[in-house]
Amino acid sequence: MAVRRVMPVVRSEAVQESREFYGLLGFEEVMNLGWITTLASPSAPAAQVSIMSGDETAPVTPDMSIEVDDVDAAYALMRDSGAEIVHPLQDEEWGVRRFFVRDPNGRVVNVLSHL
């Protein structure tokens, strides 16, 4: 299993203001689902930050996202390790397969692969 990218998820009720703030640092919008907006650097597209008002299909808002090349393998490893699975492995309508797991610090991590 390989990590493809890691991005922080900023929970915000000020999405437009946050988009403008990160835009000043050179980020541009690459995805907007209404409840989550992802911004990326045009010169380094894997450098991203997501701004989320609340997760539409999960019970909690994650603190970060980690994209891996095999989310099923990542899920099996986390489950078998005894880590707390916060949101089950599932396919989402926007083209990702994901699950949430809690890290030892209590942070919720969205682990995903694109379909």
Image (cartoon, grey):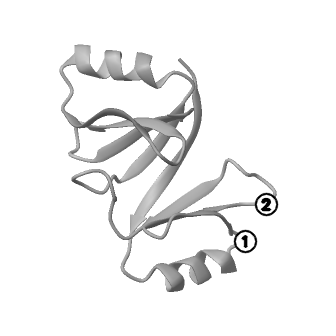
- Relative side of 40 to 17, left or right: right
Seen in the picture, residue 45 relative to 52 is either above or below; the reply is above
User: Between marks 1 and 2, how big is the CA–CA gap?
Assistant: 8 Å
- Determine which of the numbered discs, if any, sits on residue 105 in the image: none
> Where does the image place residue 42, in percent across and percent down from the top left?
79, 60
> Where does the image place residue 2, in percent across and percent down from the top left?
57, 22
Residue located beneath label 1 in the image: 26
Q: Could you tell me which residue is drawn at 65 percent across and 52 percent down?
A: 47
Front one among 8 and 50:
50
> Where does the image place residue 105, in percent across and percent down from the top left?
23, 43
Displayed quadrant of residue 27: bottom right
Extreme residue in the right direction: 43
Mark 2 Cα shell of 10 Å, populated few (<14), some (14-19), many (≥20) = some
Seen in the picture, residue 108 relative to 19 is either above or below; the reply is above
Q: Could you tell me which residue is drawn at 43 percent across and 16 percent down?
A: 73
Q: Could you tell me which residue is drawn at 34 percent across and 16 percent down?
A: 77
* Amino acid of disc 1: Gly
Circles 1 and 2 in contact, beta carbons < 8 Å = yes
- Determine which of the numbered discs, if any, sits on residue 42 in the image: 2
Displayed quadrant of residue 97: top left
> Where does the image place residue 19, in percent across and percent down from the top left?
57, 77
